[in-house]
Image: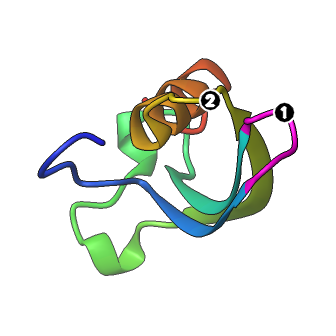
Amino acid sequence: MVQDMLKPFKIIKIVEEDDGVQGVFFEVSKREIIGSSASELSADLTKTKTRVTNMASYVGVPAGGDIDLYLLNYLKETGWVL
């Protein structure tokens, strides 16, 4: 497990599957600023529009794998975390 890591996800439950895989149920949110150009963004953040997308999912982590690191890399590959 990565120490002192600010996690962009929340692990809900971990289960051990019959084949040794660690099943991880997790939640993650992604926030996006709406507007395609700087002129559409407001200097006053109370007027800036954002979109929040939430996901709850499951991923199988290979036996002996670092759950936090595996999940972080998985979320990077799928575009949920930059």
**Compared with residue 51, is residue 1 higher up or lower down, i.e. above or below?**
above
**Compared with residue 12, is residue 15 higher up or lower down, i.e. above or below?**
above
Q: Main secondary structure of the magenta part?
A: loop
Q: Which comes sooner in the sequence, label 1 or label 2? A: 1
State the mark number for residue 19.
Answer: 1
- Cα gap from disc 1 to disc 2, whole angstroms: 8 Å
Residue depicted at x 52% and y 26%? 76
- On the image, the x and y values in percent for residue 66 come to 43, 33
* Picture quarter with the C terminus: top left
Q: Residues within 10 Å of mark 2 (few under 14, many from 20)?
A: some
Instruction: Assess whether residue 22 is covered by the magenta stretch.
Output: no
Please give left or right for residue 23 compared with residue 69 in the image.
right
Q: Which span is picked out in magenta?
A: 16-21
- On the image, the x and y values in percent for residue 60 come to 75, 37
Q: Amino acid at mark 1?
A: Asp
Can you identify the residue that label 2 sits on? 63
Residue depicted at x 22% and y 61%? 43
* Picture quarter with the N terminus: top left
SS under mark 1: loop
